[in-house]
Image (tube, rainbow, N blue to C red):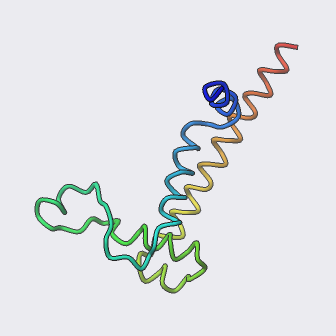
C-alpha cells in the first residue's frame, strides 16, 4: 500500500524538486536564532574556517518569517537563493507534468 502510494506520487512529483522542497522546508522551519547548526563544510571541522555560505540557513529562516532586515544581515544572498530554488522547483515540476501530459496524449 505504501509502495503504491510512492509510485503514484512519483508520477506527478519530480524527485529533484522533492529534494529541493524538502531542503528548503527543513531550513525554513529551523530556528534562525539558534547558534548550533550542522555543517558539511569540512574545513570548519578541521581548521575552524567558516564557509562562504555561513548564515545562509539563518537568512532563509528569517526570510520565511518575514524579517527581511535580519535576513539581509545574516547573508546577502538569502533571498536570491530562495528565488532561484523556487524557480528550479517550479521548472522541474512544469517539465515533469508536461512530459506526463505528452506521454498520455501519445498513448491515446
Residue 84 image position (x, y, % from top left): 56, 58
Quadrant of residue 2 in the image?
top right
- The outermost residue toward the right is 108
Numbered label tally: 0
- Left or right? Give the position of 10 relative to 56: right
Quadrant of residue 57 in the image?
bottom left
Residue 42 image position (x, y, % from top left): 20, 55
- The outermost residue toward the top is 107
Nearest the camera: 6 or 89?
6
Q: Residue at x 58, y 44 (%)?
A: 17
- The outermost residue toward the bottom is 69
- The outermost residue toward the front is 1
Residue 68 image position (x, y, % from top left): 55, 82
Nearest the camera: 27 or 77?
27
Q: Residue at x 55, y 55 (%)?
A: 85
- Left or right? Give the position of 86 relative to 8: left
- Left or right? Give the position of 60 relative to 43: right
Nearest the camera: 70 or 2?
2
Amino acid at each position: 500500500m505504501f509502495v503504491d502510494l510512492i509510485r503514484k506520487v512519483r508520477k506527478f512529483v519530480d524527485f529533484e524538486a522533492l529534494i529541493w522542497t524538502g531542503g528548503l522546508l527543513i531550513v525554513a522551519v529551523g530556528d534562525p536564532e539558534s547558534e548550533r547548526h550542522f555543517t558539511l563544510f569540512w574545513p570548519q571541522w578541521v581548521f575552524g574556517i567558516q564557509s562562504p555560505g555561513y548564515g545562509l540557513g539563518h537568512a532563509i529562516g528569517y526570510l520565511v518569517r518575514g524579517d527581511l532586515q535580519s535576513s539581509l544581515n545574516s547573508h546577502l544572498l538569502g533571498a536570491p537563493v530562495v528565488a532561484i530554488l523556487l524557480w528550479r522547483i517550479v521548472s522541474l515540476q512544469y517539465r515533469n507534468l508536461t512530459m506526463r501530459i505528452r506521454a498520455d496524449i501519445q498513448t491515446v
